Amino acid sequence: MQFPSIETPRLSLVLGTEPVLEAVLRGDRSLGKLLGVEVPFGWTEFGDPIFRFSLDMVRENALEALWWTYLPVLREEKVLIGSCGYKGPPDKEGVVEIGYEIAKPFRLQGLATELAMGLIHKAFSYPQVTAVKAHTLAEINASGSVLKKCGMEKVAELFDPEDGDIWQWVLNRPAAMKS
């Protein structure tokens, strides 16, 4: 692939550059052609709004593109399996938030854990990142299981105006990585 990506054992997390995000918004056919991959129906449940937002953020500051959207491609099969990324650059305390989705046919194969670990490792490759956080619905679910496997701990129950009760998960920078 000609686009920057985060590599994991089975996945290429393709960076949502301006051309990639524009292709997402033009449709699955355009995206598949640009990336040279199969784009299955229903690969995203998040829909256009998050990709439009990411595109606006990338256009505003291209240097911050790495803190927004990535598209996970199952490398060997050359198929897009969902979306993932960060919800912006590190805050003033050095905390970044991750989010992800896996299309239904690709769930329960360890791919969500693999991509989440890829995002976490990439985040900690930047010295200013002190912690990675994520949020799930306030219930035992697959996302919480993924985050636990990644070493995250549930640290708070919060109320989100859009989602209701949610759990906050955090993984602090490992001691061995602190400067």
Image: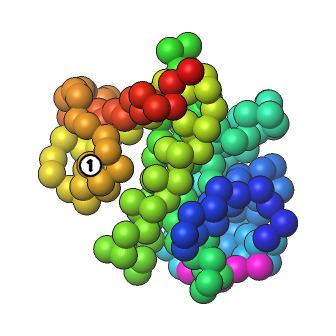
Q: Which residue is painted at 67% across and 73% down in the image?
A: 28
Assign the magenta stretch its main secondary structure.
loop
Q: Residues within 10 Å of mark 1 (few under 14, many from 20)?
A: some
Q: Residue 45 location, x and y as percent?
A: 46, 61
Q: Which residue is painted at 70% across and 80% down in the image?
A: 37
Residue 42 vertical placement versus 115 (above, below): below
Q: Can residue 41 be seen by looking at this rendering?
A: yes
Please give the range of residues in magenta: 36-40
Q: Residue 167 location, x and y as percent?
A: 24, 36
Q: Determine the secondary structure under disc 1.
A: helix
Q: Residue 35 location, x and y as percent?
A: 76, 72
Q: Can residue 22 be seen by looking at this rendering?
A: no
Q: Is residue 37 magenta?
A: yes
Left or right: 128 in relation to 155 = right
Q: Give the total number of marks visible in the rendering.
A: 1
Give the amino acid at mark 1: Lys
Which residue is the site of mark 1?
A: 148
Left or right: 95 in relation to 7 = left
Left or right: 32 in relation to 112 = right
Q: Nearer the viewer, residue 107 or 148?
A: 148
